[in-house]
Image (spheres, grey):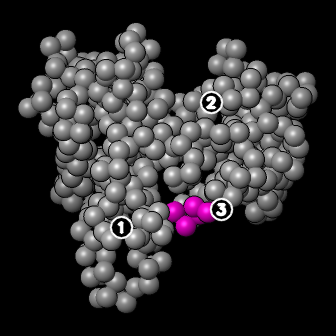
Amino acid sequence: MKVLVLNCGSSSLKYQLINMETEEVMASGKYERIGEAEAFITHKVNGQKIEIKNPAYNHSEAIDFTLKQFTNPEYKVIDSLDEINAIGHRLVHGGEKIAESVVIDDNVVKVLEEYTDLAPLHNPACILGIKACQEVMPGKPMVGVFDTAFHQTMPKDKFIYPIPYEYYKKYGVRKYGAHGTSHLYVSQRLAEIENKSLEGTKIVTCHLGQGSSICAIKDGKSVDTSMGLTPLGGIPMVTRSGDLDPSVVTFIMKKEGLTPDQAEDILNKKSGLQAISGLVPDFREIELASYGESESAAIAIEKFKYEIASYIAKYAIAMNGVDYIVFTGGIGENQINIRKGICEKLEFMGVKVDVDANNMRGEEKEISTPDSKIKVYVIPTNEELMIAKETERLVK
């Protein structure tokens, strides 16, 4: 089976064509600046990277041109689009109505529309991608894999907020979490590496990237996670504030005369580590500056490590212990000193990091010492493969 995996943004499209027999990525790439005459695609195939400028004024045009690359005689990977058996979509917010991967139908689109308020940047783009595929490849089976679905196993005492209950009943205000596909993938991959069942295991997965979230996984199920109603909650991120005293928001709104949309924009795009450091929104730049003379960058990085370690310790309470800690995502997979710094804060729990083993980037590896009470791993995430596997499972 060959599965096309799509991740639609408001003006972008990421894709991978995966051969499920070998789990090989046959071709991948990204279409950027959709909606503009300057739109372009970066197509990767057979070790080549091909950039083509091609106007795409909507997602249908972008997907149609992307599909043509798979059969382009110069670098084709399939002879006909009929060889693509199914399409897997990365979808973001399904609220309480979708608790697992689903075959996409009109009802799924309605759910995406219903929860657009909770994912205003993501859900509309997901809908555009689905409708574009229906237009360009009518009748092709499609599966939706939701970021929020994995966390629907959280018990109510973990997801409910201490505010008037009517807001939960009327508007669905509660913790939903995010990055579920990544947390699910690395936990399952850990079980494969350790050659054991997820039953009886207590794992804390740390997806650290531009957006970051921590998840407590007991018996293979999410029991708590750091992101909340939206992907703004939890630990401080590169541009997002993460958790803070709610009064901070209303205080600044009153002082600055801000609208709710303006305040939300500041918290999502102008806060986090870049705000503390006063630097550009690039984690590597901030970390590098923290080793120099920038005290503010050093404070930002220290706060990042402290908050992550705090969540890991908190989740030891949620699960009555921790057996494994997994680092993943761009920062988790590649930033050596960040992993080391977080683990050092957890020495009281018996965590011991092997400095030599940890001295690597992007590898799948255990980085704890043999006498560490908690095993620590780095496992590169592969959300696209997880989406492809779920798609194969549901359309076979």
- Under mark 1, the amino acid is Tyr
Seen in the picture, residue 357 relative to 44 is either above or below; the reply is above
Q: Seen in the image, is 15 located left or right of residue 174?
A: right
Q: Seen in the image, is 326 located left or right of residue 113?
A: left
- Under mark 2, the amino acid is Glu
Seen in the picture, residue 183 relative to 324 is either above or below; the reply is below
Name the residue that disc number 1 marks.
165
**How much space separates mark 3 and mark 2, taking CA atoms?**
23 Å
**How much space separates mark 1 and mark 2, taking CA atoms?**
35 Å
Residue at point 16% right, 26% down?
351
Do residues under tags 3 and 2 come within 8 Å of each other at their CB atoms? no
Disc 1 residue crowd, few under 14, some 14–19, many 20+, Cα 10 Å: few
- Label 3, secondary structure: give it: helix
Q: Seen in the image, is 223 located left or right of residue 89?
A: left
Disc 3 residue crowd, few under 14, some 14–19, many 20+, Cα 10 Å: some
- Under mark 3, the amino acid is Glu
Q: Is residue 271 magenta?
A: no
Do residues under tags 1 and 2 come within 8 Å of each other at their CB atoms? no
Name the residue that disc number 2 marks.
390
| Magenta stretch: dominant secondary structure | helix
Q: Quadrant of residue 29?
A: top right
Q: Position of residue 162 (x, y in %)?
A: 28, 64
Q: Position of residue 242 (x, y in %)?
A: 33, 58
Residue at point 64% right, 56% down?
111
Q: Is residue 116 magenta?
A: yes
Q: Nearer the viewer, mark 1 or mark 3?
A: 1
Name the residue that disc number 3 marks.
113
Q: Nearer the viewer, mark 1 or mark 2?
A: 1
Q: Quadrant of residue 75?
A: top right
Q: Which segment is the magenta one?
A: 113-118
Q: Position of residue 272 (x, y in %)?
A: 33, 60
